[in-house]
Image (cartoon, rainbow, N blue to C red):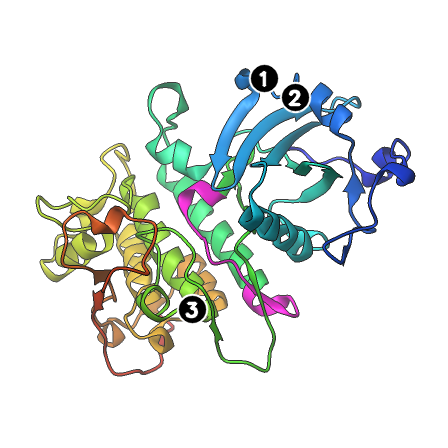
Amino acid sequence: MSCGCFGASTLTKKRSPSRAPNEIDGYPLDNVVHFSDKDLRLATDNYHPSKKIGRGGFGTVYQGTLKNRRQVAVKTLSAGSKQGVREFLTEIKTISNVKHPNLVELIGCCVQEPNRILVYEYLENNSLDRALLGTGGTHTRLDWRRRSDICIGTARGLAFLHEELVPHIVHRDIKASNILLDRHFNPKIGDFGLAKLFPDDITHISTRIAGTTGYLAPEYAMGGQLTMKADVYSFGVLILEIISGKSSARTNWGGSNKFLLEWAWQLYEEGKLLELVDPEMSEFPEEEVVRYMKVAFFCTQAAASRRPMMSQVVDMLSKNIRINEKQLTAPGFFQDSGESSLKKSSFESTSYQFSSNPASITQVTPR
């Protein structure tokens, strides 16, 4: 989670270098602002339940106010979680020096036994997941312009990670709950605990499967073969969620056992794509919305090589170009033989089936 930034120089004057470790598990922490456990307890009213703004796989996130009145998001690591420590270190290594308007800023950390805490900028409108799917007071009515801006901003953040940073970064967990919204609903990608660095001289990484059901590219979910195109796939699913206001995790869309991408493709084949649009959007440009959904299908092609790069996706979303629909083939999905297994978080004991098509490069034809 995240919030308003503050200058590190102001904070470093308050820090006591002797209290902060120089490294953790061999990784130097000299370039990260250090907070004391006492400071963060004061900021969060001793982690009062009323300050809780989110929960991740390895801990809880609290809203806090520092002594200088700056608001922050304080992400605590669950005690005793060895896997969580790995994600904690990954997050620091990945984004401690990365700045981009569409990436959440890591402000600092606390490493005082047994504490492992990350401090982020605070984002006033919480997560996209809560804005789209939240109940009661947490639900936000988003018009098309805001939804479009969220799609484009998130795409720009991913393009930066994939193509501008060296080494490149694969996020591995692009989903609505990891897209955070500032006071103007500008999106910022957060939670880099599963991220992988991706050097230029390799084509893929074979790794343990991690991520969220409904967003995983089939080649990654089945074989652990990770490329940047796995993030592109997840982003394609995210576009459909943003347009429909529906969750990709559910499997009963369309009146049958279909998850969101499968149902959307069925509607496309039937010429009924507009039925996917969130009914809360009473007015929207139909041609533009349909184009966004077709971009989502390009992002979720079964063969990774058919998916565009994120810089191409930015162009496809933000410029008035004509999509070459002839290049579009069925998306790749995976599902098992059981009705409830798509809800499982572990894929190691389940056999999945997915569709595939001969590889070719997606073409984008200017109008």
Q: Distance between the residues labelled 3 and 1?
A: 40 Å
Which residue is at 60% across, 68% downward?
A: 168
* Relative to 201, 337 lies left or right: left
Circle 3 — which element?
helix
**Closer to the camera in the image, 79 or 357:** 79
Q: In the image, which disc is placed on residue 48?
A: 1
Residue 165 on the magenta segment: yes
Q: Which amino acid does label 2 sit on?
A: Thr
Which residue is at 23% across, 64% downward?
A: 352
Q: How far apart are marks 3 and 2 (CA)?
A: 39 Å
Residue 307 on the magenta segment: no
Q: Mark 3 points at which residue?
A: 229
Mark 3 near mark 1, Cβ–Cβ under 8 Å?
no
**Percent x, y of residue 205:** 49, 73
Q: What residue type is labelled 3?
A: Lys
**Percent x, y of residue 313:** 43, 64
Which residue is at 28% across, 63% downward?
A: 297
Q: In the image, which disc is placed on residue 44?
A: 2
Mark 2, other Cα within 10 Å: few <14 / some 14–19 / many ≥20: many
- Decide if residue 102 is in sight here: no
Mark 1, other Cα within 10 Å: few <14 / some 14–19 / many ≥20: few
Q: In this view, does 261 lie above or below 41?
A: below
- Earlier sequence position, callout 3 versus callout 2: 2
* Relative to 199, 325 lies left or right: left
Look at the image and give the residue range highlighted in magenta. 162-178
Which residue is at 51% across, 50% downward?
A: 153
**Closer to the camera in the image, 340 or 200:** 340
* Relative to 258, 191 lies left or right: right
Circle 2 — which element?
loop
- In the rendered view of the protein, which quadrant contains the N terminus? top right
Q: In the image, which disc is placed on residue 339?
A: none
**Percent x, y of residue 63:** 60, 25
